[in-house]
Image (cartoon, helix red, strand yellow):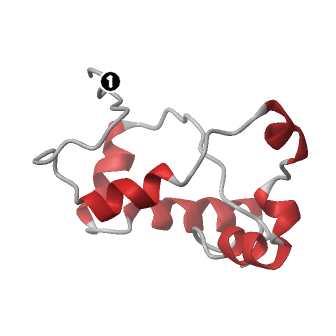
């Protein structure tokens, strides 16, 4: 993707108004001192940063399931799949029962 050209002066019919150009032009480039004095967002706004972090994704499970590779006989898989959706959960339940574990 080609980087857009930077213009030193306002040129009409470029997709923005003169007022927008003037507003953006009042935003100077950062100096080395500006970068040196900058603080991370989470440090400057800790409550907001925490709320953003907390709002994403599912809540963490106390005991998340682990993905494994397991070789099973094809007739065993066919039998569980014949029961319809949820066949993997039914295999998990059967293994829990065989291992003497309860939910």
Estimate the x, y position of residue 103 in percent, counting from the top left. 71, 79
Q: Nearer the viewer, residue 58 or 100?
A: 58
Local secondary structure at mark 1: loop
Q: Residue 17 appears in which quarter of the rendering?
A: bottom left
Residue 3, compared with residue 26, is above or below; it is above
Above or below — where is 39 with respect to 58? above
The quadrant of the rendering that contains the N terminus is: top left
Q: Position of residue 8 (x, y in %)?
A: 37, 32
Of residue 13 and residue 90, the one placed in the foreground of this image is 13
The residue furthest left is 13
Task: Please give the name of the residue rendered at 26% of the width and 68% of the height, measured from the top-left corner.
Answer: 84
Residue at the image position 81 percent from the left and 43 percent from the top:
34
Vertical arrangement, residue 24 with respect to residue 32, above or below? below
Residue visible at 77% across and 67% down in the picture: 100
Residue occupying the point 60% across, 39% down: 68
Q: Quadrant of residue 19?
A: bottom left
For this view, does 103 lie left or right of residue 16?
A: right
Q: Position of residue 18 (x, y in %)?
A: 26, 58
Mark 1 Cα shell of 10 Å, populated few (<14), some (14-19), many (≥20)? few
Find residue 30 and report its horizontal and vertical position in percent: 69, 39
Can residue 60 be seen in this snapshot? no
Q: Which residue is mark 1?
A: 3
Relative to 65, is 26 on the left or the right? Answer: left
Please say whether residue 54 is visible from this viewpoint.
yes
């Amino acid at each position: 993707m080609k980087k857009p050209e930077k213009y030193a002066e306002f040129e009409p019919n470029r997709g923005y108004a003169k007022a927008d150009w003037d507003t953006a032009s009042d935003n100077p480039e950062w100096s080395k001192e500006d970068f040196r004095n900058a603080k991370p967002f989470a440090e400057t706004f800790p409550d907001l940063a925490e709320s953003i972090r907390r709002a994403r994704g599912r809540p963490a499970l106390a005991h998340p399931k682990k993905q494994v590779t397991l070789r099973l006989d094809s007739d065993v898989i066919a039998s569980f799949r014949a029961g319809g959706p949820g066949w993997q959960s039914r295999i998990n339940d059967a293994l829990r029962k065989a291992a003497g574990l309860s939910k």
